[in-house]
Structure formats: structure tokens, C-alpha cells
Amino acid sequence: MLNKFTDILVTIDDFVWGVPLIVLILAVGIFLTIRVKGLQITKLGRAVKEMFKNDTSGEGEVSSFAALCTALSATIGTGNIVGVATAIVAGGPGALFWMWVAALLGTATKYAECLLAVKYRQTAEDGHIVGGPFYYIEKGMGSKWKWLAKLFAFFGVCVGLLGIGTFTQINGITSAVKGFFDPNTSASVELFGSTYSWSVIIAGIILTICVALVIIGGLKRISKVAQVIVPFMAIIYVIVALLIIILNINKVPGAFKEIIESAFGMRAVAGGALGAVMVAMQKGIARGIFSNEAGLGSAPIAAAAAQSKSPAQQGLISMLGTVIDTLIICTMTGLTIVITGAWNVGLDGVDVTSKAFQDGLSPLGMPNQVAAFLLMICLVFFAFTTILGWDYYSERCLEYLTNGKQKAVKAYRWLYILAVFIGPFMTVKAVWTIADIFNGLMAIPNLIALVALSGVVVAETKIYIDGLKANKK
């Protein structure tokens, strides 16, 4: 019975994250790119400048940079390490190319949704700032669309509590710790009728305490932690990946050639080119969207709290999240995998990236255990910050659903902490699949709003650009 239920969920999941949603997200990205005249390319330099300026002059709870880090804390996760590897194994090196395409279009989507979040944000009774797709749907599209806003918020709570924010991340952390410290389950204990390594139990308890200490403090504490951990973990990971690329620099041209040829089916056997292209495209685009969350409506919830005077200004800063997540970090992972050939040796998931790190760093004479340890540390930090980011997102969704009842939000925090605590012991595939479905369903109300409010995005963009021109005079 349970297997049949799981099979039904997998079928629904395949449909939700199948071609229709991918095409819809890409179509909205193309539409918005045209409407803002390729702003994600022409104003990229300006976006970087605004990020370092870190404006705190407007209304909001946290700085523009802190809001970006909070959003990145949720998007930079195990998907950047495990997801990229899975996409390349399934779709070939060409999947990385299509990941870039998804990111390029996704920056326009991220710009628009974060701009709207600041435009339509509200101040709660106790003075804190709230905003996101639920508010720009209700305030921008009109109260008759409030049901759509409620639907988005409901999906957001489900995603945070049922898996993406809790079970999958803590499970990923404890699995990585066990894989390094106790791969053969030598030190174990019987719990709930199953055998668990002590490394899993100890890691789970430590992580639960750390999560509790942060999220009980609310957004300001989450953003403070994110401002420290996110840049640190991203820089460390990129440095290690760059080191692998430099050590294997002679293989880089061949890797790019392999990526391009694979993306367009040039390396496929006769008669299989179209099929190879479709697989590479689907896996790469789906993983790119899933990793950077452009169009899903999660990042605008963080962007709404930014101390920014201009909606367009924060939109520019927030769109850098997609650049950092996919065009930089996912690219680093992908290149190390393609350069070392780790994708084509019969491994899957984190084992692919682990082999890439081990083989890539071997010219230094570095023991495999050291390379594996570096990857484990990155996984732990990536997943930990995702837990924090999704707690904030789901809290804001719940706050909207309950009309701002803080008692419900505070009770939810403890429920969230409990979910993190039991996460290492969850093995039911259905839990992950349900969370995956809700994650995809979040996108639909948000995408409808982005198309409906695209005129507002264009108008706010014009105001911002005209202001820049006037200041130059």
C-alpha cells in the first residue's frame, strides 16, 4: 500500500517538475528579459556596485547585503554539490550548458519578483517588515486574487516544514558526516527498531541545537549568521574548485568543448542526437531552476525586508543571487566533474563530486581523506544555512496565512526545530517527494503574478534608470 502511494506521488512529482513547469518558468524568464530589455546583462556591473554599497537608508529590517545573504542561505545548498552531479550523470556534460541558460533567464525573473516584493511590502503591527509573492499578488493584482496569495503561502509552509527546509537538509548533513567518520557503521546503537551510527545521532543533536539558537532569534539573527557563513562557505568552495581547475588547466578547453558538444547532441551516437539534447536540456534546466529558485517566489520574501529606498535597486542586488548560485558555484562544481571525468565512472550523487575533488587535488599529493573532508565541511555549511533560510521563508508564509499571529509563528519555530531533530531518522521516500511537489507548486501562483504585474516592473525600472541618468548630469 505504501509503495503504491509512493509511486503515485512520484508520478505527480514527475509531472509537476516535468516539461510544462520548466517551459512555463523559461517562458516567463524570456518574457521578462524582453520587457526589461536584457537588464540582467546591461546592468550587471551596476548590480555589483549596489551590492557593495550595501544601502541601509530605506525602510526595512536588514541591509540590502544581509537580505541577499538570507536568500542565498536558502538557495545555496546540497543541490549545488549533489544536484549538479546528478544532472551531469543523467544528462551528460551538456546539462551544465542548459543550467547556464536557465540562470541567464532566471536573473530577469529574480529581478522582477524581488522588485515587486519591495514595492508591495507591508509593515506589521509590531513594526517589522513583511512581504513576498502573497503581498504583491493581493496588493498588486487586487483583493479578488487573495485566494492565489493564500495558496502560495500554504505551499511555502509545507515546503519549509515537510522536507526542503528540514528533513532533506539535516539528513544530507548527517549522511555526509557518517560517510566521513563512520562509513561502515562501526559505532552504532539500536533506535526505533533500526541501527544508527553514533556519528548520525551526535551530528543531529549538535545541528538541532545550532539551528534552535539561531532561529529562535528571528530574522535579524538569521541574517547576521547568514552574512558570516554564506560568503565564507561560498568563497572556500569556489577557492577549492578553482584550485582543481588551475591544477588541471590543460583540460579546461577540452571540458568546455565537451559541454557544448554534449548540449547540442554532437557527441551522441547516430540517431540519438535529439534524445541526448532533450535529456541534457531537461536535466540541466530543471536543476538550474531548482538550485537558484528563480521564479519559485522564495527569494522575494527575504528581499522585502531589505533597507532599500528603491524597489529596482533591491531587484538588481537580489538577482545576483542567481549569478552567485548557478553561474559561479554550480559552474565550479560542474567544471570539476567534467574535467576529472568523474561523471562517467558509474557513481552518482555526492560520490561523483567527492571523486572529482579527490582526483582534481591529487597533483598536490593531497590524501583522498583530506579532499573528502573539505567536501563534507562545504556540504554541512551549505545544508545548515538552507535550514535557516527556509525557516524564515515558511515563517513569513505562516504569518500571512494567520493574519500576523505571532503566537502561531513562535509555536511553528519549535515545530520546525522538532522536524530538524527527527530528520536524520526519516527514511520514507514519500516525505521528500511531497516536499518536492509543494516546491514546484509554489512557482505557479508566483509566475502568474509576475506576468500580470510586469508593467509595474517596467515602470519601476524606468524610474530607477531615469534617476541614475539624472544623478550623472
Image (cartoon, helix red, strand yellow):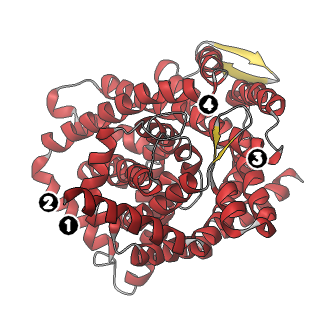
**Residues at discs 4 and 2 in contact (Cβ within 8 Å):** no
Between label 2 and label 3, give the one nearer the viewer.
Answer: 3
Residue 9 vs 329, above or below: the answer is below
Q: Where residue 257 is drawn, which disc sits there?
A: 1
Which residue: 50% across, 43% down?
Answer: 71
For residue 260, which quarter of the picture? bottom left
Which secondary structure lies at badge 2? helix
Nearer-the-camera pick, 304 or 285: 304
Residue 414: where, in percent of width, then height?
77, 24
**Label 2: few (<14), some or many (≥20) within 10 Å?**
few
Between label 4 and label 2, give the one nearer the viewer.
Answer: 4
Nearer-the-camera pick, 207 or 60: 60
Where is the C terminus found, in terms of image quarters? bottom left
Q: Where residue 319 is drawn, which disc sits there?
A: none
Which secondary structure lies at badge 4? helix
Measure the alpha-carbon separation of dots 4 and 2.
38 Å
**Label 4: few (<14), some or many (≥20) within 10 Å?**
many
Look at label 3 and name its amino acid.
Tyr
Of callouts 4 and 3, the N-terminal one: 4
Q: Where residue 400 is drawn, which disc sits there?
A: 3
